[in-house]
Amino acid sequence: MAWTYSDWITLDEGSTARLAQLRLHIKEVSDKISGGSYTTEGKSHDFDSVQKYLDRLLALEKDEAAAAGAATGDQTVFVRVVPIRPGETGP
């Protein structure tokens, strides 16, 4: 099978571009699996191996998200708000 986004592994480790490309690859693999098993030209195609590949990609996504510092829903972000008086440009 030819994948469009399988080059995610060649991008810089820990980069948001790598994580984005990986997520696109997960989507295309998932879309392929959603069709289930089928038969063409007398040959049966089963997606068990592709499902295992998808499971591995999903596990890698967690590692990549942590490396890229992406928000995974369990992180807290603190913001300091500093009021500006009229006529001032900031601290």
Image (tube, grey):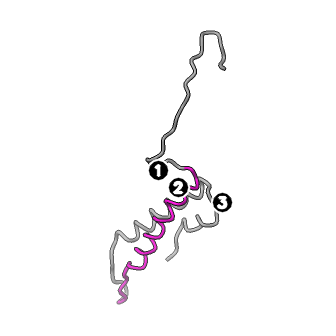
User: Residue tagged by mark 2?
Assistant: 65
Q: Nearer the viewer, residue 64 or 76?
A: 76
Mark 1 residue crowding within 10 angstroms, few (<14) / some (14–19) / many (20+): few
> Which quadrant of the rendered structure holds the C terminus?
top right
Q: Amino acid at mark 1?
A: Thr
Q: Are marks 3 and 2 in contact (CB under 8 Å)?
A: no
Q: CA distance from mark 2 to mark 1?
A: 7 Å
Q: Earlier in the sequence, mark 3 or mark 2?
A: 3
The residue lying at 33 percent from left, 83 percent from top is: 39
In the rendered image of this protein, does residue 90 appear above or below residue 27? above
* Rendering coords of residue 88 (x, y %): 65, 13
In the rendered image of this protein, does residue 73 appear above or below residue 2? above
Instruction: Give the quarter of the image for residue 11.
Output: bottom right
The residue lying at 65 percent from left, 19 percent from top is: 90
Q: Earlier in the sequence, mark 2 or mark 1?
A: 2
Q: Are marks 3 and 1 in contact (CB under 8 Å)?
A: no
User: Residue tagged by mark 3?
Assistant: 12
Q: Amino acid at mark 3?
A: Asp
Q: CA distance from mark 3 to mark 2?
A: 13 Å
Q: CA distance from mark 3 to mark 1?
A: 20 Å
Q: Identify the residue at the far top of this view.
A: 86
Q: Which mark is residue 72?
A: 1
For marks 3 and 2, give the one nearer the viewer. 2
Residue 83 painted magenta: no
Q: Secondary structure at mark 2?
A: helix
Q: Residues in magenta?
A: 42-69
Instruction: Give the quarter of the image for residue 48.
Output: bottom left
